[in-house]
Image: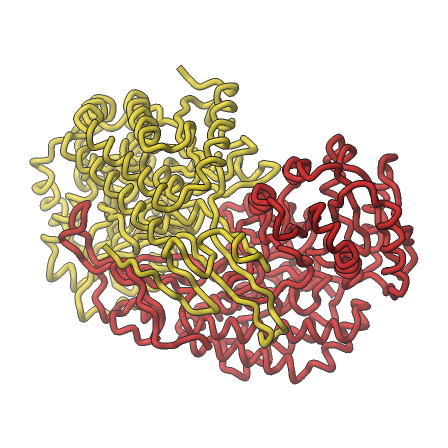
Chain colours: A yellow, B red
């Protein structure tokens, strides 16, 4: 049953009340809340994974790995906020000799935004859903979270939310700090609610853009952190092809079919030197022979997948290199065309196929690669397969311009959660310049406040000279790092 | 003569070409460009100030101070980018023992967005105009800037732009990295242009919101960093009033009339204990007796000012405490009402009067202050005037919720340029959570890119283990600060 708008309003108000209470928590206390959630998820792992298998058709090892990713993430974020990195504490003492004239004592710290609405994705029922990256980073920042469940795994969402709520309660967090809502009316009311101060979203370009527009049109516009997926183009140089064609095709075949191709980082576009179509077809057919397809996440996604592949095939200059199908458990499809064709039809480069399909584009000469890259829209990732002797500086420069992450001789599926990770990229990969993976994701849910000439005793802890939390502080321009060191 | 849309397009394309060339510059080279601009502005100061006096009616010392602020800012930003703080360079080496599974080598750095459009304000012809905070921070970030001149000082804008362009040229920066455009068609085309990747704006709520909506509605939405001004409420406790009433009224009188009240940080709202209206009126009249009014920035602002004050006076429960006028050089006006009235008419708290006017609101008991603060919209600043014994923790907490900067026993006019400064605040103070003053402003014009498994020799300098630029790097979770210290 869907959450009514009336219930949604009450839930958001309760979240605000919990946020107001939770603000006094030290980073250590808040970190313990995150760790309590991680522990509780692990304790309920078998039950959670069982439901997830049934609702998403994903395999057990994949789901177990994803749950491990989620609990690791909660603990990494707990570490990060204990260090206070996210606070960006900056202290400028009063200085009569300051170059533009005497400056007062002024100190800045990041504070949490308030109640955050999070929309889960269907394809990662743990890592980008109820207590995935957006929820974990918003809670780490000190926000309250109201999560809109994805219709694709409602039972799992409810059970996960129960685990999270109970774990927060057991750890002493204020009631209402995390809540689950379902259904479209509640989703729209969540984006509109005056107490909601930011949205985290993972999903389709169409759905994401509609909600982005809604968030921007509010009387008080709010940031909409939407991760809308992408194409993840891969460029193979002639040298790389000559030296490692078998490895490259094997890596490609594995990466574009991983999780039935239902990753936002699936390589959906592969640029290869021309003249090898038959050989590529034969090799890929062989590589994919043993592939055991499973069902896609939902009927709706299956229909969307069939439609997207069909749209590309409508172009008479696009042919089928490896013939797949659209059975309930679809076999992989590889399409094929040439650089000349995509130059005349650049829309071919922007068609995401959310399933086990990819398109190979043949180029005649490496000098075509930079102009081809210039036809691409914003991408979550791009990849270069190249050899030490290759001069690809211009190409990688162009790829950095349009990508959130650029890979060298790797494959884009697999997004590790670290300090340096950036899972984002120019529109339409995302609706913002931010990341939804890694510790940097926490910063999205904070905003700075400066305190001028405050008595020392009235300053928030992170801005006190005595530094009671032992965090990093930038003092008069120079960073003084805490005594805490990495893990 | 206004810039045609055709010319605007050519200027933006030239800016993009210059940006592409300028990207290879090291922070040191780019810093020297900023310093060259600062030197050139100083060399032409007398001429610039002459024009500014004529066009804006502001006084010579004020304009000289503002120019000094602008050159200081350019040099401070030069220092900041030499340190590489803005790059947020983060290096995670490959780690097979990483908790969620082996991680690849992954490194993140901030890169400039591209061409930035900057809209200047009328009230700071140097500090928030052609080469003010937005332009300086965008250039420091590595972006190209196309500046839309404010109609209020077109001659000054042209002369300033000439100085900037010549200084960049003399320092060896690519031609086109900075350009000036004028007129509304070019302004709109600038926000719409596909090569423009962010907008910096200082101005009115109405104008800013219209352009924000335009930026959000683009096929590729772009960040719109709008500083739209505000009310800057000041709260005086009973103890502070009893102990320092004369100082407080003197500070208030000076602050709300500074620059003829044409500051976005003007205290437009003063909460005082009830029962002293006549005394306050008498003291303020005395304090303002010697005040020498000058002309407002423009006829249009003068009309807007008269209209805004008139709107507040329409309410029969608002009376005039100090009678000013709306002569060409208007004398200050102080309005007066009570907490009861504003509770019933909260719109009285959101009416900016851009000129030498403010409104005093009497409260009966200090317990009213938090609920009154809850009626306020987002503010650039809020101020508490209090004594050591006062328990104002809840009030300052609430003020931090709605403000970019909270002051203790000070006055909000005067915004120093430092590392910790935050000149921003929740909507409608700004359209984003960011600052338009201080070194943190540079980050607005950057976005992160991650490099995965890149050969060491192909990594950008800030991400190389050898750290050729000597900047701060976060390595495997811990910051390693450069050998450069302070300035």
Q: Is residue A344 visible?
A: no
Kindly identify the residue that appears in the image at 53 percent across and 67 percent down: A93
Q: In the rendered view, tell whether residue A477 sits above or below residue A36.
A: below
**Which quadrant would the N terminus of chain B be assigned to in this image?**
bottom right
Nearer-the-camera pick, A336 or A381: A381
Q: Position of residue A297 (x, y in %)?
A: 26, 28
Q: Position of residue B289 (x, y in %)?
A: 90, 62
Kindly identify the residue that appears in the image at 62 percent across and 56 percent down: B201
Quarter-wise, where is residue B351 in the image? top right
Quarter-wise, where is residue B105 in the image? bottom left
Kindly identify the residue that appears in the image at 54 percent across and 31 percent down: A192
Kindly identify the residue that appears in the image at 44 percent across and 19 percent down: A3
Q: Is residue A180 visible?
A: yes
Nearer-the-camera pick, A442 or A413: A442
**Looking at this rendering, what residue extends furthest in the top direction?**
A1
Nearer-the-camera pick, A365 or A250: A250
From the viewer's perspective, is A87 left or right of B166?
A: left
Q: How many marks?
A: 0
Q: Position of residue B431 (x, y in %)?
A: 58, 48
Q: Position of residue B203 (x, y in %)?
A: 68, 55
From the viewer's perspective, is A233 left or right of B88?
A: left
Q: In the rendered view, tell whether residue B484 sits above or below residue A242.
A: below
Q: In the rendered view, tell whether residue B115 sits above or below residue A179.
A: below
From the viewer's perspective, is A227 left or right of A456?
A: left
From the viewer's perspective, is B218 left or right of B236?
A: left
């Amino acid at each position: 049953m869907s959450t009514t708008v009336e219930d949604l309003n009450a839930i958001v108000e309760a979240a605000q009340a919990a946020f107001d209470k939770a603000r006094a928590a030290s980073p250590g206390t808040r970190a313990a809340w995150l760790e309590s959630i991680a522990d509780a998820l692990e304790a309920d792992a078998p039950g959670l994974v069982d439901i997830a298998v049934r609702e998403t058709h994903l395999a057990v090892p994949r789901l177990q790995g994803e749950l491990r990713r989620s609990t690791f993430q909660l603990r990494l974020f707990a570490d990060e906020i204990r260090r206070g990195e996210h606070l960006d504490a900056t202290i400028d003492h009063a200085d009569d000799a300051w170059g533009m004239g005497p400056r007062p004592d002024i100190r800045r710290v990041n504070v949490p935004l308030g109640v955050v609405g999070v929309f889960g994705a269907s394809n990662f029922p743990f890592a980008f859903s109820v207590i995935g990256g957006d929820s974990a980073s918003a809670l780490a920042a000190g926000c309250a979270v109201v999560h809109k469940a994805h219709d694709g795994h409602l039972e799992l969402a409810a059970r996960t939310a129960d685990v999270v709520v109970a774990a927060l309660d057991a750890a002493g967090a204020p009631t209402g700090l995390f809540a689950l809502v379902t259904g479209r009316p509640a989703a729209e009311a969540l984006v509109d609610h005056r107490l909601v101060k930011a949205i985290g979203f993972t999903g389709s370009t169409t759905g994401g853009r509609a909600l982005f527009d809604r968030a921007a049109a509010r009387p008080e516009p709010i940031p909409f952190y939407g991760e809308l997926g992408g194409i993840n183009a891969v460029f193979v140089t002639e040298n790389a092809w000559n030296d490692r064609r078998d490895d490259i095709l094997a890596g490609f075949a594995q990466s574009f079919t991983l999780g039935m191709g239902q990753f936002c980082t699936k390589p959906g576009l592969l640029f290869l030197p021309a003249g090898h179509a038959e050989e590529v077809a034969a090799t890929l057919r062989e590589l994919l022979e043993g592939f055991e397809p499973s069902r896609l996440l939902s009927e709706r996604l299956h229909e969307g997948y069939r439609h997207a592949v069909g749209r590309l095939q409508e172009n008479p200059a696009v042919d089928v290199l490896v013939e797949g199908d659209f059975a309930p458990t679809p076999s992989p499809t590889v399409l094929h065309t040439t650089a000349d064709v995509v130059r005349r039809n650049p829309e071919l480069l922007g068609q995401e196929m959310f399933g086990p399909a990819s398109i190979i584009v043949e180029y005649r000469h490496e000098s075509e690669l930079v102009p081809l890259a210039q036809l691409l829209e914003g991408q979550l990732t791009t990849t270069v397969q190249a050899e030490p002797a290759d001069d690809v500086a211009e190409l990688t420069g162009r790829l950095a311009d349009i990508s959130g992450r650029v890979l060298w001789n790797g494959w884009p599926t697999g997004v590790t959660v670290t300090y340096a990770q950036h899972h984002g990229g120019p529109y339409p990969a995302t609706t913002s310049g931010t990341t939804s993976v890694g510790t940097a994701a926490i910063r999205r849910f904070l905003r700075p406040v400066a305190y001028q000439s405050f008595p020392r005793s009235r300053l928030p802890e992170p801005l006190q000279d005595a530094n009671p939390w032992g965090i990093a502080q930038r003092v008069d321009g120079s960073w003084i790092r805490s005594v805490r060191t990495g893990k």
